[in-house]
């Protein structure tokens, strides 16, 4: 006999059955991957994507499904899945991530005159593997009761000792900080950028891991100036038009304000490539731009599309013309620099 | 299957059983090995950079967090458990089960709630500034102690539950004897009750310590980088998955070391204690200010760890209700169904495997095998994101090999059977949460003394009756507890689910994470509340079952 064998056998069988259920449930979810009228997306942008895709589905009848995640994890997954990946498109919220995806061979080239015409050259990959869709400007924010705009000029000038204990920034773990430092490296070289970051550290900069919280802390008086993305202010102003914080476009006398993108590329092994290109083109056009950028108070990458009124009220400004693929190339240097400078 | 070794000496040891056991252990340990194997080819350049820059800070912070959370959960968990076991005071009956409730709140949710409440712009600090001036002192929550506080408040229930069980199982006679010999009640507590409950308490503290080692979301809210956070810094920031794995491998080695200490500690203190129908530790009725103090201790802990966060979630939820659309409601419903599906599947699967490992290793009667089987608990101290990497890579390899094989043989490719389905996800949950189910099941098996089985056999029961009438009823509470704990943990689980779920298979926790990452706190409220409420149901079941178990305790 063996009762013990019987039990062990039963247990193993049960495990197999449960695994089978797991495969079934998961596969059922993926069943129409190859069915045609669908696009599957990996996206690290989670805010406001759903209404945009719903509108696209309404106009074209193509269903859009997406899985969110953090950028590095989504790229690893794309890499591991290789040619069997269900994903047709990769959307990221930082140029560095798109650059890396292109570099790792995860994205395919797309030749499209529509995209060429809609997206300016410095906001897309030189090899057309990814395209910026919205612009987000990381710049100086201040409380007008305690700071006058005349006292402000550049990001670099915030290392002046007069801002000691008054400046709020994001920790080094966030790609926003890393890309900002990459742009400093591009402008000043490694040593120059390190001196600037050491200046932030010496100024006992307050580090808060949420741009919204930074702006709230600024309003409450924890600091007087801060560096955040512009659209977080737009979002707060939409909820409360009297929110006291003002935006200052940094580095206008020189290279222009630091700009980043959220953007997308078609995966190297996309099964629904034609549909995915259709979506990408639609997102770069007036309709898609208005929804995709406007819902998050970002600036459309397409210069022909008008910005949301709340951020249009922030005024005209000049942006750094650097090709934003550079942020990806310099990211590792930036992180090591931040570590060396003792910027947490 | 749970027959203890002594009754089986007559039978020849089976060959299949050790094989099943080895395979299970190997599968659970595999991802950890995949990650740790990177240590064989160290990335010296990265390590030099880390050693010169952030590594000392990461190690210091990790040590501080480990010490703080261990001490905090030890004091609060054990203290409250003793209060509930040995004293009677107003509200004791309610506090007895309510003190477990904070377990239902994920640490990352607690983290952003405490941040919202106590940060500079939060209501408490604002009130202090408003009343006593802009420069009035207020402790800085965005710090190491903030992280320690929040983690202690979410993790103390582990210690409380286990310590309470440790105290309640003790026969009161030892304690009475000490008192009769002139010991004060306090002294009797430290010399008799506490040492007797030490294995349980140590197990609880070890769980809390491992949980704090693996956390990366909470420490980030408080800007208190630990080694777990360093892994993500190296992977995401320096784009070096190899070096990140090495750091994770070190973390795994360290937790192995922790496990060994805990095991040695327990090994020397092996008591088959089962007080049966004997009276437990005598309950002293408190009166006057001591009673008020006792009630206050329980009430304050419960308020800080459960009431306050729940209140904040409710406030946000009310705001959310005002703008709730049917479409969003439908989304929440879908998320809840997904979460429940995953949690139930994982709960059943993990506890089943834990049962197999625990019982087979006992059955084998071999010490080495029993020690080996403790390895399955190692995943608990490893950050979920790292486990996900350790599973994704071998499973993807398996998927690709399978596809190549089928296309060669039969000309069709089934696609990603493992990584594209729930299998990879379940596998990761098993690795991560085996420790919880295993310790729970194993602890309940510990209670079955060889004498219990021998007595039953001597009374004429055959092996089947011993199993179904004696052993299963005895371990059932442990099995149930294990399943429930895993269920609750999977409801809360974040990094593995984010990385390994099939396309579009979102859960409540994933939604909360996304909204929190965007600082949209009101949108986190309803899904977070559902996580908490769903977590409460099994906790209640568990507590009812354990108190029922107490009543019909078999000696």
Image (tube, grey):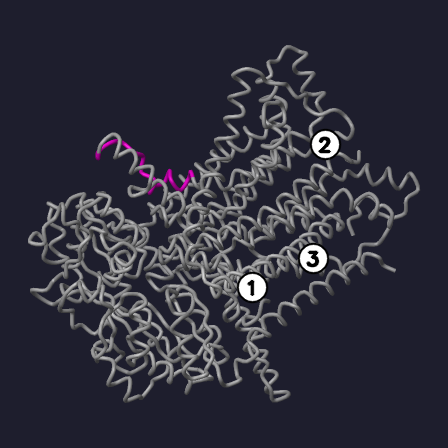
Q: Chain of mark 3?
A: B
State which tag comes first along the sequence, 3 or 1.
3
Q: Secondary structure at mark 1?
A: helix
Q: Secondary structure at mark 2?
A: loop
Which residue corresponds to the image point at 11% horizontal and 62% vertical from the top-left?
A251
Magenta segment boundaries in residue numbering: B134-149
Tell me: residue B366, above or below residue B268: below
Q: Dot 1, how many residues are within 10 Å of its Cα: few (below 14), some (14-19), or many (20+)? A: many
Q: Secondary structure at mark 3?
A: helix
- Depth check, mark 1 against mark 2: the one in front is 1
Indicate the quadrant containing the C terminus of chain B: top left, top right, bottom left or bottom right. Answer: top right
Q: Are marks 3 and 1 on the same chain?
A: yes
Q: Which residue is mark 3?
A: B21
Q: Dot 2, how many residues are within 10 Å of its Cα: few (below 14), some (14-19), or many (20+)? A: some
Q: Which residue is mark 1?
A: B425
Q: Is residue B500 left or right of residue A288?
A: right
Q: Please provide percent x and percent y for residue B511.
A: 46, 60
Q: Which residue is mark 2?
A: B273
Name the foreground residue: B64 vs B529. B529
Which residue corresponds to the image point at 52% horizontal and 67% vertical from the top-left?
B505
Which residue corresponds to the image point at 81% horizontal and 36% vertical from the top-left?
B451
Q: Please provide percent x and percent y for residue B176.
A: 69, 17
Residue occupying the far top of the picture:
B182
Find out whether residue B43 is within the magenta segment: no
Q: Are marks 1 and 2 on the same chain?
A: yes
Q: Dot 3, how many residues are within 10 Å of its Cα: few (below 14), some (14-19), or many (20+)? A: many
- Depth check, mark 3 against mark 1: the one in front is 1
How far is mark 2 from mark 3, CA to CA? 28 Å
Q: Chain of mark 1?
A: B
Residues at badges 2 and 3 in contact (C-beta under 8 Å)?
no
């Amino acid at each position: 006999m063996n009762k013990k064998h019987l039990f062990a056998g039963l247990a193993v069988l049960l495990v197999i059955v449960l695994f089978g259920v797991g495969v079934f449930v998961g596969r059922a979810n993926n069943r129409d991957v190859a069915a045609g009228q669908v696009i599957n997306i990996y996206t690290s942008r989670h805010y406001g994507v759903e209404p945009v895709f719903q509108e696209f589905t309404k106009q074209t009848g193509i269903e859009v499904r997406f899985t969110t995640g953090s950028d590095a994890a989504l790229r690893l997954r794309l890499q591991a899945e290789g040619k069997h990946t269900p994903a047709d498109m990769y959307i990221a919220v930082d140029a560095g991530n798109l650059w890396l995806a292109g570099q790792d061979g995860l994205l395919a080239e797309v030749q499209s005159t529509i995209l060429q015409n809609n997206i300016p050259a410095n906001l897309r990959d030189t090899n057309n593997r990814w395209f910026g869709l919205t612009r987000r400007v990381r710049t100086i924010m201040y409380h007008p009761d305690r700071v006058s705009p005349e006292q402000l000029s550049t990001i670099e000038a915030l290392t002046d000792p007069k801002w000691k204990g008054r400046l709020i920034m994001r920790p080094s773990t966030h790609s926003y900080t890393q890309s900002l430092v990459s742009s400093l490296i591009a402008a000043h070289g490694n040593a120059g950028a390190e001196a600037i970051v050491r200046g932030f550290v010496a100024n006992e900069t307050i580090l808060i891991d949420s741009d919204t919280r930074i702006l709230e802390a600024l309003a409450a008086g924890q600091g007087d100036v801060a560096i955040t993305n512009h659209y977080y202010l737009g979002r707060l102003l939409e909820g409360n038009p009297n929110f006291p914080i003002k935006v200052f476009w940094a580095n206008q006398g020189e290279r222009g304000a630091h700009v980043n993108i959220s953007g997308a590329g078609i995966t190297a092994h996309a099964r629904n490539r034609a549909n995915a290109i259709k979506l990408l083109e639609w997102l770069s056009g007036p309709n898609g731009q208005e929804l995709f950028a406007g819902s998050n108070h970002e600036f459309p990458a397409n210069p022909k599309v008008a910005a949301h009124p709340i951020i249009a009220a922030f005024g005209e400004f000049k942006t750094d013309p650097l090709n934003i693929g550079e942020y990806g190339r310099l990211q590792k240097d930036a992180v090591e620099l931040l570590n060396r400078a003792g910027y947490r | 299957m749970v027959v203890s070794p002594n009754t089986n000496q007559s039978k020849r040891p089976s060959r299949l059983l050790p094989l099943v056991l080895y395979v299970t252990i190997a599968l659970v340990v595999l991802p950890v090995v995949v990650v740790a194997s990177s240590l064989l080819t160290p990335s010296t350049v990265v390590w030099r950079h880390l050693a010169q820059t952030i590594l000392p800070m990461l190690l210091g912070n990790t040590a501080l967090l480990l010490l703080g959370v261990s001490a905090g959960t030890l004091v609060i968990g054990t203290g409250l458990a003793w209060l509930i076991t040995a004293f009677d005071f107003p509200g004791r009956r309610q506090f007895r089960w309510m003190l477990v409730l904070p377990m239902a709140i994920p640490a990352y949710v607690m983290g952003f709630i405490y941040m919202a409440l106590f940060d500079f712009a939060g209501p408490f600090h604002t009130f202090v500034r408003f009343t006593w001036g802009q420069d009035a002192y207020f402790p800085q929550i965005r710090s190491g102690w903030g992280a320690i506080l929040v983690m202690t408040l979410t993790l103390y229930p582990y210690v409380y539950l286990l310590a309470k069980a440790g105290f309640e199982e003790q026969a009161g006679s030892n304690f009475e004897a000490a008192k009769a010999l002139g010991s004060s009640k306090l002294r009797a507590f430290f010399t008799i009750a506490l040492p007797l409950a030490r294995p349980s308490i140590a197990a609880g503290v070890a769980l809390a310590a491992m949980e704090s080692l693996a956390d990366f979301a909470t420490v980030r809210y408080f800007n208190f980088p630990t080694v777990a956070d360093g892994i993500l810094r190296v992977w995401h920031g320096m784009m070096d998955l190899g070096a990140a794995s090495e750091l994770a491998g070190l973390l795994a080695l360290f937790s192995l070391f922790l496990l060994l200490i805990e095991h040695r500690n327990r090994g020397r203190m092996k008591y088959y204690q089962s007080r049966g129908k004997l009276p437990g530790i005598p309950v002293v009725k408190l009166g006057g200010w001591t009673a008020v103090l006792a009630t206050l201790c329980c009430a304050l802990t419960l308020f800080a760890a459960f009431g306050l966060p729940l209140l904040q979630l409710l406030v946000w939820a009310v705001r959310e209700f005002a703008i709730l659309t049917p479409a969003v409601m439908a989304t929440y419903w879908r998320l809840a169904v997904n979460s429940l599906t995953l949690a139930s599947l994982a709960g059943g699967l993990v506890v089943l495997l834990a049962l197999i490992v625990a019982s087979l290793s006992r059955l084998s009667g071999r010490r080495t095998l029993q020690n080996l089987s403790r390895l399955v608990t190692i995943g608990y101290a490893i950050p979920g994101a790292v486990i996900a990497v350790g599973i994704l890579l071998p499973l993807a390899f398996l998927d690709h090999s399978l596809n190549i094989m089928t296309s060669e043989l039969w000309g069709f490719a089934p696609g990603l059977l493992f990584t594209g389905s729930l299998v990879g996800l379940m596998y990761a949950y098993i690795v991560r949460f085996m420790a919880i189910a295993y310790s729970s099941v194993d602890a309940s098996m510990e209670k079955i003394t060889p004498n219990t089985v021998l007595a039953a056999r001597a009374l004429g029961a055959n092996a089947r009756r011993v199993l179904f009438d004696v052993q299963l009823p005895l371990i059932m509470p442990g099995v149930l507890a294990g399943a429930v704990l895993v269920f609750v943990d999977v409801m809360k689980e974040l990094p593995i689910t984010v990385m390994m779920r099939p396309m579009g298979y979102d859960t409540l926790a994933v939604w909360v994470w996304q909204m929190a990452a965007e600082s949209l706190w009101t949108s986190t409220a309803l899904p977070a509340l559902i996580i908490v409420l769903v977590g409460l149901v099994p906790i209640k079941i568990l507590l009812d079952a354990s108190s029922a178990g107490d009543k019909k305790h078999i000696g």
